[in-house]
Image (tube, rainbow, N blue to C red):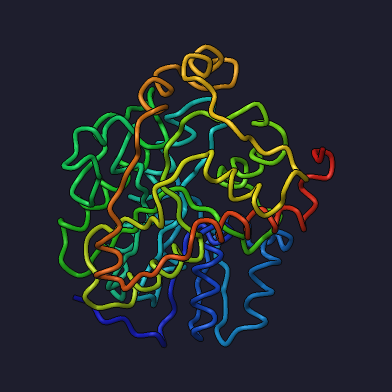
Amino acid sequence: MQTIDKTKPVMVTGATGYVAGWIIKKLLDEGITVHATVRNPGNKQSLMFLDVLAEKAKGTIRYFRADLLTEGAYDEAMAGCELVFHTASPFTSKIKDPQKDLVDPALKGTRNVLASANRTVSVKRVVLTSSCAAIIGDAKDCLGYPGGIATEAQWNTTSTVDHQAYSYSKTVAEQAAWEMVKAQNRWDLVVINPSLVIGPGINPDATSESFSLVRQLGDGSMKSGVPSFSIGVVDVREVAEAQYRAGFLPEAEGRHIISAENTDFLTLSGYLQKKFGKAYPFPTKILPKFLIWLIAPMAGFKRKMIRLNVGYPWRVDNTKSIRSLGMAYRPVETSIVDFFQQMVDAKKFENTKK
């Protein structure tokens, strides 16, 4: 059990990221000094939205250059910090080499950050952004869990570097973190395991897989229909709040599933159609699994992934986050509408309206 001094600086890795932006906003609003690690502190364009947050808040922000794959890169930024938020990890479907593009940055990056924590005597707690992907590899896995629902007790044992490489990267990175924390007794580890994160970003022009997926619901890419794909969804603002509480609640411990609802693509599309009507070509039906399986390679998906996910319920239990962190989740309908509205305001659909 660790008590964190809010007068000390707090380090956030991957500061320009989707989730990190909201964590930094929360910290700055609380009057905390943020040590933000980025690839290039000289790129003022990429830091513009964080600078705006700092100008309006009680806290201050300092930028530090750091790279996930460089040993010792986080030592300078971590100096004097009692609390570290490690959010930096690639989340993309556009990969050429899964090991190089996903696994190495996630695993080596986590080891590098935690090695810095071992060297930095001020550090008391690390909050790691993992994922529900480290709990569930494929939706079919849920059939083997008690009641068909995953809890923090489960681990993803089915993903590999060749199958669901992103999920594999999150799994091995989190496992490495638990191994490293057990090897010492000065700092503790609290893990946040979000499902699919949606909601407006600090930077309306940011890109992530979440942005890409929701944009595709409205740009015509899925107008012929969507697969029967079950997912968990959570608002990015709740993920940031969970991170903050995991950092500062002395009793916080272990893993925490952060997910508002178990839902699916068609339901999300329905929320958007309810709000925006027929202004955008939202999908309105489920495509047959055999058709999805047939066209999967042309769409960049492996047929094994389709076989083990489409048509299977994906379910997680968020009870621990509510009980231990005091989380309250806004409706997914609100999150998806707010997210899509931000994209509309940023003119992301200028050429896709009917």
On screen, residue 276 versus residue 241, left or right, reads right
Q: Is residue 293 toward the left or the right of residue 168 in the image?
A: right
Q: Whole-percent x and y of residue 85?
A: 40, 64
Question: Could you tell me residue 328's position as x and y percent?
Answer: 39, 70
Q: Position of residue 324 (x, y in %)?
A: 25, 70
**For the view shown, which residue lies furthest in the top direction?**
294
- Label count reads 0
Horizontal arrangement in the rendering, residue 246 relative to residue 299 (left or right):
left
Q: Position of residue 87 (x, y in %)?
A: 44, 57
Which image quarter: residue 96? top right
Residue at 31% across, 55% down = 257
Residue depicted at x 34% and y 36% = 313
Along the line of sight, the residue nearer the viewer: 3 or 180? 3
Residue appearing at x 58%, y 68% in the figure: 63
In the figure, 172 relative to 227: above or below?
below
Above or below, comparing residue 196 to residue 181 in the picture: above
Q: Quadrant of the C terminus?
A: top right
Residue at 56% in and 64% down = 21
For the N terminus, the quadrant is bottom left
